[in-house]
Every structure is written in structure tokens, then in C-alpha cells.
Amino acid sequence: MILFRQRPALVISAGICILLICIALIAPWLAPYDPTAGNLLDRLMPPFWQEGGSLQYLLGTDVLGRDILSRLLYGARISLAVCLISIAIAAVIGSTLGIIAGYMGGWVESIIMRLVDIAVSLPAILLALLFGVLFGPSFSNIIIIIGFLLWSQFARMARGETLKVKQNDYIDLARTAGCSSLDIMFRHVLPNVAASLIILATLQVGTVIIIEASLSFLGVGVPPPTAAWGSMIAEGRSYVISAWWIAMFPGMAIMFTVIAANVLGDELTDLINPALRNEIGI
Amino acid sequence: MTGYLIKRLVELMVALLIMSLLVFSLARLTGDPVALLLSDYATEEERTTLTQQLGLDKPLTEQYVIFITAALQGDFGNSISGNQQPAMELVLERLPASLMLASAAMIISLLAGVPMGVIAAARRGSKTDILIRVFTLLGQSIPVFWLGMVFIYFFSVQLGWLPTSGYGSLVHLILPATSMALFTIAAITRLTRVSMIDALSSEYIKLARIKGLPERVIIWKHALRNSLIPLVTYMGTFFAMMITGAVVVETVFSWPGIGRLAYQSILDRDFPVMQAVVLTTTVLFMLANFAVDLVYVWIDPRIER
């Protein structure tokens, strides 16, 4: 309650995020229809409040007669899974390299940080498109692509935070007590930089949802007929004039989810470590 | 300072080399262009001739050396689809449209983003600030390609004010440039706001206030000038956003730029065009990044890193 009075935006956005995760988890029980099987007799039905719509299909149907609502609910699962797995991969790889760079210093640091600089200088979308086409559109490939696009940010932040933590006396003490470098890095440094890394991960949720949707829109995301928000928009593109609802609802779902995730990320930054704001910049 | 620039230059060259290797090897691995070009009924002889013509029968290392020497002279071979134009010619033909769109979007972003960030920071906590923050939140949360379609639906289909797609006049530029700019406006606004808040609480601003300078001069001259430095550092990131925006927005609005060319060539497995587009874009991107580094070192000579 106190938290709610002090930071209503934090509580509300966290609540919405939890709700969205729950929806994604129980989508099979919530969805009224099979998201991939359409009824061709009910093609292009408008949402229920429009003329010609019916309560049978609350948000209408697409060109193959598939229920938009069911596809949206199942699409949430894809977005959630892509977010969790790709950010986890990027965080583990990036943070490990970043902590090693920050702690070891010297040539190890130079090599890792040069790699980071180079990774940042690659035009991400072209890389993603090339990879998507090479390995074919699939769920695991999109996770690898997005994970690859994100690791460098974790590495930068982990290194920066490690450099700060390293100056503390307890690190010197641990070393004098005979702890190995590996021990110090993962028992003493990691817990102290974890908060910042978790904030960065939260801040990236919105970005990942948008990247995933963009790649699906361009046809290199999760392949059809699986319901993903980005590919639903792509499918609705040719029907913007005659059947606006096909593309409109998934877009709104993306927008709503990303807003909730972004507000949560911002609020967590303010709450836990406001100084990070300058480091992350945008 | 020179050391820093040399280091950056080397990094960019390595990035370019990686891109060229990737482009080269990826293009060879994404299925067989010979099978794509010829019909299923083509004879074995026709296949071999075409394979030789495209140089696909040589060892990969040799293919790369041939590729890179030719690429350095701007020769990427002919497009293997359509009327078989030289790939580089296609890219150069499409480049002006993309540059026009990107610069229009960049100008809109700066003209809208910087003042909004300054105003939000100057009136921190006010209704205007909240409104601007809500706007930036929206700007960073709406997928650009979807926004483009919403724009088309409202402004072109419903209201009939602007053309749905096409290229040529200033009217055609409005919708794509605005959709592309929205994300960067939000990013620039946020960045300017944060660094302005920092600047406004610094000692030299207090001094300026004590001196009795008008608030307008303090905000728009003294504080803003120092807040622009972080903006310059992020220019590289903004260029990356622009390239991403170009691919997506050009696809939505059928804009004849290199973004759509990249997308199309990848779909068609048109190796020469794909290579030409990706490498040209990468070179432009690296040049932009290096220019940013130069400007950065020039405005803030303390940079050594």
C-alpha cells in the first residue's frame, strides 16, 4: 500500500506485466478457438460492435477465418518466450564477459571491449535479416538473433559496474583470504552488479518485443501459421482498407505491452539505482 | 586524441571486414541461386554454364578474394533478377530516395525532440513535462511499421489527405518521414531532457542565475549548449535506428529506397544486390559513426577513454 501511494506507476505497470504474463501462460484455456485453424465460412468477420460482426468472434476473424482474439492470446506466448529466452541468453553471455573484462583488466579487457565496440558498430537490422534468411525463419533462430543483438549492452554495463565494485575493500580482503579470481568474480562481484543488470534486462523487454515484431513483419520471425503479433500485422497489411481489425489489434497489443514494460523498467531504474539513467542514456 | 581516433578507425575497419565476410558467406549459404534462376526442367548443361557464369564453381576463398577486389571498385556483379542491372547501379539509383527520407526524418526528430526535451526539463514536474513524457513513452512503444499502416488508414484512406504510397513530391514524404521520426523524436527528447536536468542543476547555471541573466538565455543558451554533448555521442545509435526504420518504413510505404531494396534482394536471394546494399549501408554507417567520433573529440577534448 505504501509503495502504491509513493509509486503508483510502478505498482500499476508491474501489475499489468504480471497479468500479461499470466494471460500468455494460460492462453490455451482462455482462447475460444484454435489459433491456427480457421473456418473459411467465417472469413473477414468484423469485431462484434461493427455491423456484420457477432459475439461469436469478439475481435473478428482474418482472411482465413481464424479468430483474431485467439491469435492475439497465443501471440502473447511467442512474445513472452522470445523475450525471456533471448534476454536471458544475452544477459548471461554479456554479463560474464563484462565482469571478466572489468575484473581482469589488461589485454583480456581490451579484447572483450573491442569486440563489444565492433558488435555495436554492426548495423543490427541488416545482420538480423541476413541471419533470418540464412537459417530460415524459426523460433530458435529468432532467439539467437535477438540474443546476439543485445549481449554487448550487458557486457558494457557489467564491466562499468564491476570497475566500481572492484574498488571496495571487501574485494581486496577476499583476495588476501585466498579466494580465486573466479570465486571473487562470481561470489562477490556478481551479486553486487546484479541489480543493475536486472534493470537493464527489464528496460530491454520493450525493445525485444518490437524487434521480434519487426522481424516477424518482415517475414524472418516465427514462421506461419503460428500466431505472432508482428506476422499478424503483416498479414493484415493488404487488408488495411477493407478489414482494418486484422492489423489494428495486434499493433495495439504490442503497444500496450511495450508501454507497460517500459514504464516498469523506468520505475525500477528510479527506485533501485537512479544513477544508471545516465549510463543507459536513452 | 589521435590515438583514440586511430583506435576507432581500426575498430570500424574490423567491423566492415566482418560484415563483408558475413555478407559473402551468408549469401553463399542461403540456398542455391542456380536452382532459383532456372526452371525445374533445365538441363544439367544449362546448370553448369550458369554456375560458371556466376563463378559459383570456384573454391570459396577464391570467390571471396574475387568478390572483395571487385567490391572495392564498386563492382558487385549484375543483379540476378529483373533486367539484370549492375547491382551497384541499382543501389546508387535507390540511395537518394533513402537519404532524402532519412534526412527528413532526422531533421523532424531534431526540430521536435530538442525543444521538447528542453521545455520538459525547464518545467520539470509540470503538466507540460508529464505530457511530453507520455508522448516519449508512446513514441518508444509503438512499432514503426504498424504506425505507418495506421497513418495510411487514417490520413490516406479515411481522410484522403495524403497519398498511401509512392515517391516524388513533398506530399509523399510526409507520412513515411513522420512515422520514421517518431521513435527518434522520443529518444532525442528523453536524452535532451535528462542532460538538461543535469545541466540546470550545475554550478555554472547557479552562477548565471546569480548574475541575473534572464531565464530564457540561461536555458536556451548556457544549459542547452552543454546538454548537446550527450546527444552527439548518441548520433551513432540514431543512425542505426534510421537504417532499421528505413527497411521497415520503406517496405510499408513502398518507398523506392535501399531499405526496400535490401529486403527485396534478401527475399529474391539476389546475391549481388544483397551484397552491394548491405556493404554500402555498412560503409555509410561506419562513416557516420566516425564523423560522430570526430565531432565528439572536437567538442569535448577531454575524451581519451
Image (cartoon, rainbow, N blue to C red):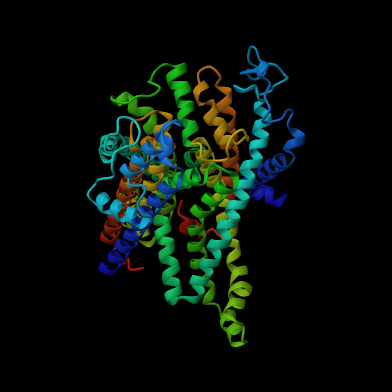
In the image as oriented, which residue stretches furthest toward the top?
A51
Write down the quadrant of residue A109 in the picture. bottom left
Q: Taking the image as drawn, is residue B213 in sight?
A: no
- Residue displayed at 64% across by 50% down: A6
Q: Is residue A12 left or right of residue B82?
A: right
| Viewer-closest of B105 and B86 | B86
Judged left or right of residue A43, residue B114 is left
User: Could you tell me residue B285's position as x and y percent?
Assistant: 33, 49
x then y, percent, for residue B251: 42, 32
Q: Is residue A237 above or below residue B63?
A: above
- The answer to which of B177 and B45 lies nearer the viewer is B45
Q: Can see residue B286?
A: yes
Q: Nearer the viewer, residue A131 or A147?
A: A131
Residue A172 located left or right of residue B219: right
Across and down, in percent, residue B139 comes to 48, 38
Q: Is residue B212 left or right of residue B156?
A: left
